[in-house]
């Protein structure tokens, strides 16, 4: 747990440096290390079900993974049940690590969660696929997949 404490302290420093409203931000590697060290930690995937089906998802134990869509597919309409679903999926006394494609939606979701009283919500920097490279491809610049963390393809 000492390593997790150090990681969460780095996440809090990022929060302070970047003026984030939520607990902090972790790299994909740090998120994976937290999940391995703390069986109560939860990876909350805020992408759409379609993205999971078409692109894949992190390969973490089922009890440590939940899909809680920030937006709905099709149409990209905000999920009105997001906070209720997050409450049902994320333990209040353990880190909830939010992941999306490139860390844009997860930041917004983490902010909304913090406003609703969640105190242990962290954004996973770079997301699952990372930003696009010069040719417009993902998984080449950053993200869970780029860092060769375990994932299940579509």
Image (spheres, rainbow, N blue to C red):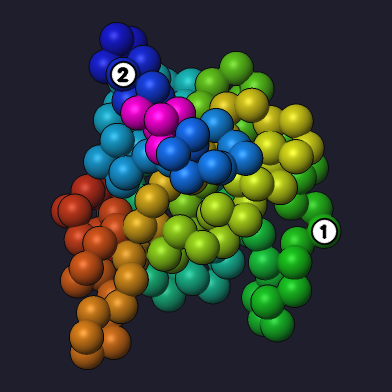
Left or right of 134? Residue 80 is right
Provide residue 7's location: percent of width, then percent of height.
32, 25
Residue 90 belongs to the span the image colors magenta: no
Residue at position x 72%, y 35% in the image: 87
Q: Which corner quadrant holds the C terminus?
A: bottom left
Identify the mark at residue 6; answer none if there is no mark.
Answer: 2
The residue depicted at 70 percent of the width and 82 percent of the height is: 75
From this view, report whether residue 140 is shown above or below residue 16: below
How far across and how far down the image is residue 111, in percent? 65, 46
Q: Residue furthest bottom?
A: 135
**Which one is earlier in the sequence, the residue at label 1 or at label 2?**
2
For the N terminus, give its image quadrant: top left
Asked if residue 35 lies left or right of residue 62, the reply is left
Give the secondary structure at mark 2. helix
Q: Position of residue 102 (x, y in %)?
A: 41, 64
* Classed neighbour count for the residue bearing mark 2: other residues with Cα under 10 Å, few (<14), some (14–19), many (≥20): few
In the image, which residues are magenta? 10-14
Q: CA distance from mark 1 to mark 2?
A: 35 Å
Q: Is residue 32 visible?
A: no
Q: Is residue 116 left or right of residue 37?
A: right
Q: Main secondary structure of the magenta part?
A: helix
Q: Residue at x 55, y 53 (%)?
A: 107
Q: Quadrant of residue 90?
A: top right
Is residue 77 placed above or below 81 in the rendered structure? below
| Mark 1, residue position | 80
Q: Are marks 1 and 2 in contact (CB under 8 Å)?
A: no
Q: Quadrant of residue 114?
A: top right
Within 10 angstroms of label 1, few (less than 14), some, or many (20 or more) residues?
Answer: few
* Closer mark to the observer between disc 1 and disc 2: 2
């Amino acid at each position: 747990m000492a390593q997790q404490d150090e990681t969460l302290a780095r996440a809090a420093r990022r929060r302070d440096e970047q003026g984030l409203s939520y607990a902090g931000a972790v790299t994909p590697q740090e998120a994976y290390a937290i999940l391995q060290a703390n069986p109560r930690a939860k990876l909350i995937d805020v992408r759409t079900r379609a993205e999971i089906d078409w692109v894949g998802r992190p390969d973490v134990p089922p009890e440590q993974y939940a899909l809680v869509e920030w937006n709905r597919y099709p149409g990209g309409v905000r999920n009105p049940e997001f906070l209720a679903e997050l409450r049902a999926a994320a333990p209040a006394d353990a880190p909830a690590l939010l992941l999306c494609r490139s860390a844009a939606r997860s930041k917004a979701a983490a902010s909304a969660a913090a406003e609703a009283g969640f105190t242990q919500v962290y954004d996973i920097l770079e997301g699952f696929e990372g930003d696009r490279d010069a040719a417009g491809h993902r998984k080449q610049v950053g993200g869970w997949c780029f860092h060769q963390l375990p994932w299940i393809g579509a």
